[in-house]
Amino acid sequence: DGDVETGVRVLDAPCWSGASVEEVLAAVDDDEGPAAVFLADRHTRESPVRALLAVDTLWEDESGLDPEYYQELVDAPAPREFRLVPAAVHGVHANLELGNLGFEEFAASAAAGPGGVLRPA
């Protein structure tokens, strides 16, 4: 019928000003939460392209793993965050939710892009 439910929620509340990434992740930490959150922080306000911070909600700290058994994980830990322009949010969100692409793939594209910021194709 043309109606598409995106599952995106925009939160614009002064009480979150200055919140850390960990505080935001703690607030969205549930089994039905999003695959990523997109944050507007000080860098976003100062960036000429208004680059948001994308943060993986499923990221796990692998620094405590035994390197004898998990060498490949310890050598190249998965990225937890990357920057993207606001116009890229919908594509990243949709592809993460559908499982078409992983967070690491978007982070790699961002790192390879101008200024380390992901832009829509």
Image: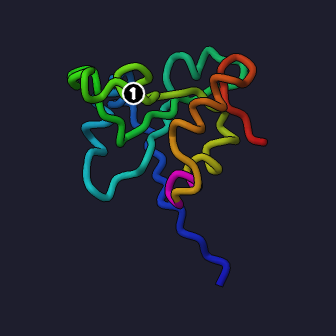
Please state the horizontal and vertical placement of residue 17, each as a whole percent of the image.
39, 25
Which residue reaches farthest front?
Answer: 68
Please state the horizontal and vertical placement of residue 41, each as a whole percent of the image.
49, 23
| Span shown in magenta | 94-98
What amino acid is at disc 1?
Glu
Relative depth, front residue between 86 and 65:
65
Relative depth, front residue between 120 and 49:
120
Identify the residue shown where x is 43% and y is 48%.
35
Identify the residue shown where x is 65% and y is 17%.
47
Q: Quadrant of the C terminus?
A: top right
Please state the horizontal and vertical placement of residue 32, each as a whole percent of the image.
31, 58
Considering only vertical position in the picture, is 5 above or below 18? below
- Dot 1 alpha-carbon crowd within 10 angstroms: few under 14, some 14 to 19, many 20 or more: few
Identify the residue shown where x is 65% and y is 50%.
91
Task: Say which residue label 1 marks.
Answer: 72
Res 13 quadrant in image = top left
Relative depth, front residue between 108 and 4:
108
The overriding secondary structure of the stretch rendered in magenta is helix
31 left or right, relative to 16: left
90 left or right, relative to 25: right
Q: How is the image coloured?
A: rainbow
Please state the horizontal and vertical placement of residue 12, each as a whole percent of the image.
45, 39
Residue 19 magenta: no
Identify the residue shown where x is 58% and y is 22%.
44
Q: Quadrant of the N terminus?
A: bottom right
Helix, strand or loop at label 1? It is helix
